[in-house]
Image (cartoon, rainbow, N blue to C red):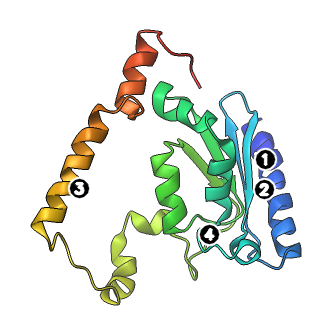
């Protein structure tokens, strides 16, 4: 039963990947479903069509899921992301921040930018990290300003901690 469901949603993701290829961009598609197996977001790679290097299928699916994704963070709803290719590091970050609990993909991307599995063993990226200059916390005054912003954000009513508290007492409707 689960495999049949996975197949169905992976086929939807493949349809998105096919559209991407027809649009002359990287053929990757993604679909997000909720715990009741409703499609809440679809996406396809649009890097070339939109001239946006962040327009990956998984990120687009998360964006297209809209406010529904906040349910995952606030009320710990379970979502599954189906992708035609192993998510890259950027998309993996999006998946982790969206608190998507299950990810299914059709093809590992060991030779490309697939990163979901590799992030767990970051030594795979050692050569890439060697090419990046990193300068951490170089200016104390700007660091302090950012810390102040983070402190203010912690008290903001839209901070996920605040939203969870409101949801627990029933003062807001789940998104």
Say if 70 sits above or below 166 in the image: below
Counting from the top left corner in percent of width and height, residue 100 is at 54, 43
- Give whichever of discs 2 and 3 has the lower sequence position: 2
Q: Nearer the viewer, residue 7 or 151?
A: 151
Q: CA distance from mark 4 to mark 3?
A: 38 Å
Label 1: how many Cα within 10 Å (few below 14, some 14–19, many 20+) = many
Residue annotated with mark 1:
9
Q: Nearer the viewer, mark 3 or mark 1?
A: 3
Q: CA distance from mark 2 to mark 3?
A: 39 Å
Q: Is residue 55 left or right of residue 168?
A: right
Q: In the picture, residue 30 is in which quadrant?
A: bottom right
Q: Residue at x 73, y 67 (%)?
A: 28
Q: Are marks 1 and 2 in contact (CB under 8 Å)?
A: yes
- Give whichever of discs 3 and 1 has the lower sequence position: 1
Q: Are marks 4 and 1 in contact (CB under 8 Å)?
A: no
Q: Secondary structure at mark 1?
A: helix
Counting from the top left corner in percent of width and height, residue 8 is at 83, 46
Residue annotated with mark 4:
108
Q: CA distance from mark 4 to mark 1?
A: 17 Å
- Give whichever of discs 4 and 1 has the lower sequence position: 1
Q: CA distance from mark 3 to mark 1?
A: 41 Å
Counting from the top left corner in percent of width and height, residue 155 is at 28, 32
Residue annotated with mark 3:
146
Residue annotated with mark 2:
13
């Amino acid at each position: 039963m689960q495999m049949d469901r996975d197949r169905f949603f992976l086929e939807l993701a493949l349809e998105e990947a096919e559209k991407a290829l027809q649009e002359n961009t990287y053929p990757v598609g993604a679909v997000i479903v909720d715990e009741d197996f409703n499609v809440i977001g679809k996406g396809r790679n649009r890097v070339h069509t939109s001239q946006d290097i962040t327009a990956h299928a998984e990120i687009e699916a998360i964006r297209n899921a809209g406010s529904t994704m906040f349910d995952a963070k606030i009320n710990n709803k379970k979502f599954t992301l189906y992708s035609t290719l192993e998510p890259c590091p950027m998309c993996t970050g999006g998946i982790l921040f969206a608190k998507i609990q299950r990810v299914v993909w059709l093809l590992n991307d060991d030779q490309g930018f697939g990163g979901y599995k590799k992030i767990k063993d970051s030594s795979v990226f050692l050569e890439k990290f060697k090419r990046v200059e990193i300068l951490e916390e170089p200016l104390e005054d700007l660091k302090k300003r950012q810390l102040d912003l983070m402190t203010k954000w912690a008290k903001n009513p839209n901070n996920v901690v605040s939203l969870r508290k409101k949801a627990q007492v029933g003062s807001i409707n789940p998104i």
